[in-house]
Image (tube, rainbow, N blue to C red):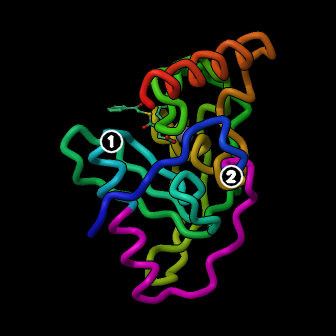
Amino acid sequence: MAFLNIIEYPDPRLKTVARPVTRFDERLSNLVKDMAETMYQAPGVGLAATQVNVHERLLVVDISETKDRLHVLVNPEIVWASEEQVECEEGCLSVPGVYDAVTRPAKVKVRAQNVDGTPYELDCEGLLAVCVQHEMDHLLGKVFVEYLSPLKQTRIRTRLKKRKVKAA
Ligand code: K1U
Ligand code: ZN
């Protein structure tokens, strides 16, 4: 297993739209293991393949404190979303140090495949619903800061540029 490099905003590769996964092979199961390890080590509660520069429809999520409830979603699709919306503070491993409120459907039902290709459905609410929607946005090339005002987006870009210069 290996830790993968997480791409940071505003890297243009984060805008890539992921293609469906078609091969459920050893390469996929190794990628899932590496993504899970990278997410736990970061630490984070979710990670989309886009963030590790793999442009395939795959994400991992684990919102448990015990880090033993990993959800692997291959080719996820939202098949139902509640009318009820919820505002939640979001963060992103690709936008380090930035947290802000985003409003999304409070509950979603997601159809996905597991690492073997077996289809299943997942009913999500609370942080799981927020996290799954956030990760699915990554697969469409969208980062949560795009829900914020243009002024906030400019400030975030400036802050991250300064952070990068300082780290160099
Ligand atoms: O980068 C990502 O997409 C992962 C992101 C998921 C997320 C968190 C909160 C709301 C929406 C989406 C993170 O994991 S950011 C880090 C974080 O929130 C966290 C880290 C350690 C423990 C608990 C939470
Ligand atoms: Zn993110």
Q: Who's the residue at 74% across and 32% down the image?
A: 83
Q: Earlier in the sequence, mark 2 or mark 1?
A: 2
Which residue carries the number 1 mark? 42
**Structural distance between the alpha carbons of marks 2 and 1:** 20 Å
Crowding around mark 2 (Cα neighbors within 10 Å: few <14, some 14 to 19, many 20+) is some
Q: Who's the residue at 51% across and 63% down the image?
A: 73
Mark 1 lies within 8 Å of ligand 1 (Cβ measured): yes
Q: Report the span colored magenta.
A: 14-34
Give the image location of residue 21, x and y in percent. Answer: 62, 77
Q: Is residue 27 magenta?
A: yes
The picture quadrant where one finds residue 152 is top right
Foreground: 104 or 98?
Answer: 98
Give the image location of residue 58, x and y in percent. Answer: 55, 64
**Where is ligand 2, by quadrant?**
top right
Q: Where 93 sits versus 111, above or below?
A: above
The residue positioned farthest toward the left in the image shown: 66
Mark 2 lies within 8 Å of ligand 2 (Cβ measured): no
Q: Where 148 sits versus 127, above or below?
A: above
Q: Nearer the viewer, mark 2 or mark 1?
A: 2
Q: Is residue 155 left or right of residue 41?
A: right
Foreground: 166 or 16?
Answer: 166
Q: Who's the residue at 67% across and 27% down the image?
A: 145
Residue 106 is labelled as none
Residue 13 is labelled as 2
The picture quadrant where one finds residue 167 is top left
Q: Where 23 sits versus 115, above or below?
A: below
The quadrant of the picture occupied by the C terminus is top left
